[in-house]
Image (cartoon, rainbow, N blue to C red):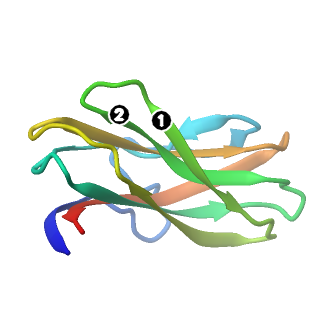
Amino acid sequence: GKLLQFKTSGNGTGTDTGFPSYATNNINNVGANIGSSITINRISANSYFLITVSALIGRAATSSWAYLGYTSSFAGASNNEIYGYLADNASSVRYTVQFGNSTSGSVGDAVVVQGYYKNTASHNDNVRQATINIMEYQP
């Protein structure tokens, strides 16, 4: 394959909350954006995208189901929501989920990716130090 471009978001260190002006804590039984979105312009009409979302997530053993993923928009189209299931745990764990996207388009199309987290229980989950990576490639 051939790597066409790669873009990554900023990442927090230590105990800070990650992205500039990012404060996604206490996500309670709903979904929330995590960090800032990434925008790239498509280089090839027949390329693919590999999207990775990573975050440090504090969840209680009683958290029930949770999902880490992203929303995306290709050339201004409506957002797609894609998630990976997270297991229960009783401490903070860094989760990384990876997705392939083969949406076709035109050279120059804006591709916007936004990290997203949601849970299914009525309690607070804490999310910090999130990163988003997106790679455009040709197989």
Quadrant in which the N terminus is drawn = bottom left
Asked if residue 9 can be seen in this view, the reply is: no
Which residue is labeled 2 in the image? 73
Which residue occupies the foreground of this view, 68 or 60? 68
Q: Is residue 100 above or below residue 41?
A: below
Which residue occupies the foreground of this view, 81 or 119? 81
Q: Amino acid at mark 1?
A: Asn
Q: Is 15 left or right of 5, judged from the image as shown?
A: right
Dot 1 or dot 2: first in sequence order is 2
Residue placed furthest toward the right: 62
Q: Residue at x 24, y 30 (%)?
A: 75
Element type where label 2 sits in the image: strand
Residue 110 image point, x, y percent: 19, 36
Q: Is residue 102 above or below residue 96?
A: above
Element type where label 1 sits in the image: strand
Asked if residue 72 can be seen in this view, the reply is: yes
Q: Residue at x 74, y 71 (%)?
A: 91
Q: Amino acid at mark 2?
A: Ser
Quadrant in which the C terminus is drawn = bottom left
Instruction: Report which quarter residue 130 is drawn in.
Output: bottom left
Which residue is labeled 1 in the image? 80
Q: Residue at x 40, y 69 (%)?
A: 13
Q: Is residue 80 above or below residue 47?
A: above
Residue 128 image point, x, y percent: 52, 57
* Dot 1 and dot 2 residues touching (CB under 8 Å): yes
Q: Is residue 56 above or below residue 26?
A: below
Q: Residue at x 20, y 64 (%)?
A: 138
Count neighbours of disc 1 (C-alpha within 10 A) and say few if under 14, some if 14 to 19, many if 20 or more: few
Instruction: Report which quarter residue 134 is drawn in.
Output: bottom left
Which residue occupies the foreground of this view, 29 or 49? 49
Residue 119 image point, x, y percent: 73, 45
Q: Is 47 left or right of 96, judged from the image as shown?
A: left
